Image: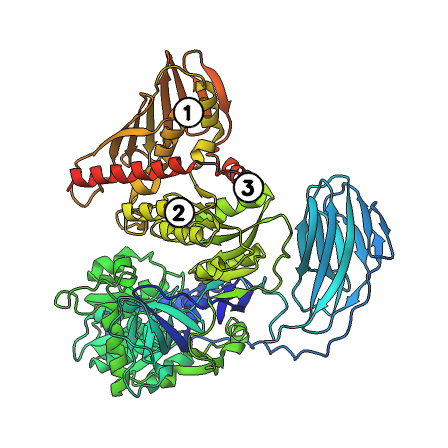
């Protein structure tokens, strides 16, 4: 499937796997989705002062403020003075579309010239030996310009050995004035093909030093420039540049499939969908049930695609609580503002509107708005005339700007004890005088309505009682659709453009310009001949790194922050691992990682990589509740498994893993991310304890910090802090003692309900087979600063040892330092141990019985804490 992503350069149309259906969700094939010009284009638009900004507009807002202040004393005089105020507009041109692709032409062979003080030897067979100088960033070798057919992608094929310092391989334009792309390779062997984006009619291949450089040699058996035609679907030969973030939050389409627990929606139903991160600009979307509504029979899906913004406008009007005959003002007449005007009119209000764009004011007038202007002072005059000098009963701010002017103007337009409702994202540095003098109520309107930003409502399907919360976000969506279907609300006149999905990047480029922006822009999705939902949940990325013999090819399952910032970099630094596949339900985040690492496969379902013989290892870094099932699937498929802690959240999960591992004739390596036993500080301590004759007394204190109860770590996804983190400490106890656990006890603080969970603050004491005793003090009551997170004290044979937050290990009796350095919790050494085991075909770095024991202790402590606080 295809999905629109945004990055700092604009919009890209990315190849993506179809989203995987989850329980409580609905798989929808999109027909139309709405581009939110204000929200989506904020990061792309040139620097702008916003709806009310700049000295000229600020002066006019101030004039309106003074006018309304005078109106309290002499409305007639203020009305005469306001006529002199006026304001201009500026229009800018939109960019043109790029021309079509020319006919392809072949490339010529490369010839090389040395640059700087480098020397090179180029053989007729393509072999190249380059002796590099030590000048940072200096060119070392330059080819002749090569013509590239329009739409074709240049690719550099390299095979050889790069010496001590990395080498930059890049392409320059014909005049060598700008880079068309570059990549750093080495040190070490390289055997790969690097595909660069199309666009330059001529390119020159350059080999250059990086910023830090020294004299070294690079020897290549093959250096070749290849020209690759566009893919059969018309896309480029490489997908690696298709990176960006999800956009879109309002679409309409057809239900393809429903997940477990969804009973009131069926395949074939037409639905409207909401939710950033769910209702994206993509051919398919998986949307939680509470974020979609059936479309009434006969309603045009183009209108239904506006449901999200309609619900936003409706919630803003509900917050204003308009009554028949009241006067209301709307600041900002974009798409949401236009809908607010229509809803207020339907409520029986007299409506005055303001927008700096006079054309938008006229559109609102055409819909029935009684008065309005692009000039703040003229709006102030209209408010005076229509309210007998009192001011508006309600002011709804639907603008989007960092300026504080809209909220302050709203205060001046409102009557005493009136309401100002903030729907748009505006500055909130309000002037106190306006609030205080009029005692105005300032109200926030939260997106689509109650339930928004509540994970239990949006993602887990919990509803609010109808009798207590009449208008949830879902019921707001339903009400909006009903108004459209009945004809009481009209939105078709606000949809200015409908663009095919293939033209979406060009549409964004036009919208980001300085010219007049349309109100409603829809993306229309093609309805292909294939059966809906038949698209695969994995894609092979074009331009991926070539597979190299001897590498440990792994699939990363879960592309969260820890995986991308810790695991993937450590695996890359080791040098023996190759990221071959990324499995992630967030295809944008997972896709960004896969493309930046030049992985071969991007998938949304684990099954897509389990069946591949060229995947050796699963690296599982999903949320905790998925670990056991994914590890079990990997073991049954014969894959080696590295799973971040915890291994399991229940006794049933642990039993299944033990059975699968025990029944395998030659079980794969199963390793859990208990990295602390690999830290240099604890290793130095364990070496010091080697040969001991007495048991240990171990005190492990964790100043864990506070985690809110609504965090995913505290819910079903995370399992709580004992199962999710304390398992680390139980593994350290087993590793230090070298003996199995024999007894477990635990107790937690007696905290008021709703403040802490039993697993937030507890003490667990473990007795081991060698007579050792270990105590874990785990607390979230400590300070964020002034006390390190982790401290380990060990007492043995008349001596004491201390490990302070993995920066220092010392023998307390004489102050001897066993190890010191920067914080090192053992992640790199953990990866090295895993690589050694896989390369040698030897046993796992963590014995299976020790892996299981850490989970057994965690679950035992969990039972004790839950029972003791039940």
For marks 1 and 3, the one nearer the N-term is 1
Residue nearest the observer in this picture, 403 or 131 = 131
Residue 82 appears in the figure: no
Sort mark 2 into few (<14), some (14-19) or many (20+) by Cα contacts within 10 Å: few
Compare marks 1 and 2 and give the one earlier in the sequence.
2
| Label 1–label 2 contact, CB within 8 A | no
Nearer the camera: disc 1 or disc 3 = 3
Q: For the point 43% across and 34% down, which residue is it?
A: 676
- Which x, y percent locates residue 111? 84, 59
Secondary structure under the numbered disc 2 in the rendered image: helix
Asked if one can make out residue 730 in the rendered structure from this viewpoint, the answer is yes
Q: Is residue 306 left or right of residue 497?
A: left
Please say if the residues under marks 2 and 3 sit with CB atoms less than 8 Å apart: no
Residue 740 in which image quadrant: top left
Q: Residue at x 50, y 24 (%)?
A: 820
**Which of these two is toward me, 13 or 527?**
527
Question: In the rendered structure, which disc, 2 or 3, sits on the residue that comes first in sequence?
Answer: 2
Q: Callout 1: helix, strand or loop?
A: strand
The residue labelled by disc 3 is 841
The residue at which mark 1 appears reads as 803
**Between residues 610 and 3, which one lies in front from this camera angle?**
610
What crowding class fits label 3: few (fewer than 14 Cα within 10 Å), some (14-19), or many (20 or more)?
Answer: few
């Amino acid at each position: 499937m295809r999905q629109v992503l945004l990055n700092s350069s604009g919009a890209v149309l990315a190849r993506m796997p179809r989203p995987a259906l989850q329980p409580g969700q609905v798989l929808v094939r999109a027909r139309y989705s709405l581009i939110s010009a204000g929200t989506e284009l904020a990061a792309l638009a040139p620097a702008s002062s916003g709806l009310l900004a700049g000295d000229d507009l600020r002066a006019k807002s101030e004039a309106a403020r003074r006018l309304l202040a005078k109106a309290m004393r002499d409305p007639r005089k203020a009305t005469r003075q306001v006529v002199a105020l006026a304001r201009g507009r500026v229009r800018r041109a939109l960019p043109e579309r790029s021309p079509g692709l020319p006919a392809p032409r072949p490339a010529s062979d490369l010839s090389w010239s040395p640059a700087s003080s480098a020397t090179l030897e180029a053989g007729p067979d393509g072999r190249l030996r380059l002796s590099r100088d030590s000048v940072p960033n200096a060119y070392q070798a330059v080819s002749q310009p090569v013509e590239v057919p329009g739409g074709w992608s240049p690719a550099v094929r390299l095979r050889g050995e790069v010496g001590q310092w990395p080498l930059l391989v890049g392409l320059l334009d014909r005049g060598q004035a700008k880079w068309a792309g570059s990549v750093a390779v080495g040190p070490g062997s390289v055997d790969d093909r690097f595909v660069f984006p199309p666009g330059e009619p001529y390119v020159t291949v350059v080999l250059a030093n990086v910023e830090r450089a020294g004299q070294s040699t690079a020897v290549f058996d093959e250096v070749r420039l290849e020209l690759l035609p566009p893919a059969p679907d018309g896309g480029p030969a490489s997908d690696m540049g298709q990176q960006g973030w999800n956009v879109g939050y309002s679409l309409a389409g057809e239900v393809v499939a429903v997940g477990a627990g969804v009973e009131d929606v069926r395949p074939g139903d037409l639905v409207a969908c909401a939710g950033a991160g769910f209702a994206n600009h993509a051919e398919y979307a998986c949307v939680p049930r509470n974020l979609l509504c059936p479309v009434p029979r006969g309603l045009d899906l183009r209108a239904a695609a506006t449901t999200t913004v309609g619900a936003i406008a409706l919630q803003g009007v509900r917050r204003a609580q308009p009554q028949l005959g009241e006067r209301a003002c709307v600041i900002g007449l974009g798409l949401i503002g236009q809908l607010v005007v229509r809803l207020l009119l339907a409520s029986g209000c007299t409506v005055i509107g303001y927008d700096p764009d006079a054309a938008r004011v006229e559109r609102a007038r055409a819909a029935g708005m009684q008065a309005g202007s692009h000039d703040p002072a003229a709006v102030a005059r209209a408010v005076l005339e229509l309210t007998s000098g009192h001011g508006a009963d309600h002011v709804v701010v639907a603008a989007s700007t960092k300026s504080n002017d809209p909220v302050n103007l709203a205060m001046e337009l409102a009557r005493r004890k009136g309401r100002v409702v903030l729907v748009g994202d505006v500055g909130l540095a309000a002037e106190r005088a306006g609030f205080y003098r009029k005692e105005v109520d300032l109200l926030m309107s939260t997106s689509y309505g109650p339930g928004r930003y509540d994970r239990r409502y949006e993602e887990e399907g919990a509803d609010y009682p109808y009798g207590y919360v009449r208008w949830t976000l879902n019921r707001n969506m339903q009400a909006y659709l009903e108004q459209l279907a009945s004809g009481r609300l009209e939105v078709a006149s606000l949809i200015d453009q409908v663009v095919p999905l293939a033209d979406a990047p060009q549409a964004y480029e036009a919208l980001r310009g300085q010219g007049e922006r349309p109100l409603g822009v829809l993306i229309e999705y093609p309805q292909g001949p294939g059966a809906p939902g038949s698209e695969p949940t994995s894609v092979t990325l074009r331009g991926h790194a070539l597979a190299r013999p001897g590498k440990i090819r792994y699939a990363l399952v879960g592309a969260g922050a820890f995986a991308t910032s810790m695991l993937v970099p450590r695996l890359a630094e080791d040098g023996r691992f190759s990221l071959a596949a990324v499995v992630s339900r967030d295809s944008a985040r997972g896709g960004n990682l896969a493309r930046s690492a030049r992985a071969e496969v991007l998938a949304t379902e684990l099954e897509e990589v389990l069946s591949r013989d060229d995947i050796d290892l699963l690296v599982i870094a999903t949320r905790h509740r998925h670990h056991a099932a994914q590890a079990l699937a990997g073991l049954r498929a014969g894959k080696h498994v590295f799973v971040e802690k915890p291994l399991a959240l229940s006794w049933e999960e642990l039993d299944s893993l033990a059975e699968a591992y025990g029944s395998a004739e030659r079980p794969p390596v199963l390793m859990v991310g208990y990295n602390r036993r690999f830290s240099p500080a604890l290793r130095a301590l364990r070496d010091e304890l080697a040969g001991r004759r007495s048991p240990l007394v171990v005190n492990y204190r964790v100043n864990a910090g506070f985690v809110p109860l609504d965090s995913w770590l505290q819910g079903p996804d995370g399992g709580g802090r004992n199962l999710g983190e304390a398992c680390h400490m139980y593994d350290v106890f087993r590793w230090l003692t070298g003996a199995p656990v024999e007894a477990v006890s635990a107790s937690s603080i007696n905290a008021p309900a709703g403040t802490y969970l039993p697993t937030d603050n507890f003490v667990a004491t473990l007795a081991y087979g060698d007579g050792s005793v270990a105590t874990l003090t785990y607390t979230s009551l400590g300070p964020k600063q002034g006390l390190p997170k982790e401290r380990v004290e060990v007492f043995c044979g008349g001596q004491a040892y201390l490990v302070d937050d993995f920066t220092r290990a010392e023998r307390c009796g004489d102050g001897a330092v066993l190890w010191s350095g920067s914080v090192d919790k053992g992640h790199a050494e953990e990866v090295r141990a895993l690589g050694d085991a896989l390369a040698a075909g030897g046993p796992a770095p963590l014995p299976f019985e020790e892996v299981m024991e850490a989970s057994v202790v965690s679950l035992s402590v969990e039972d004790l804490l839950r029972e003791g606080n039940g």
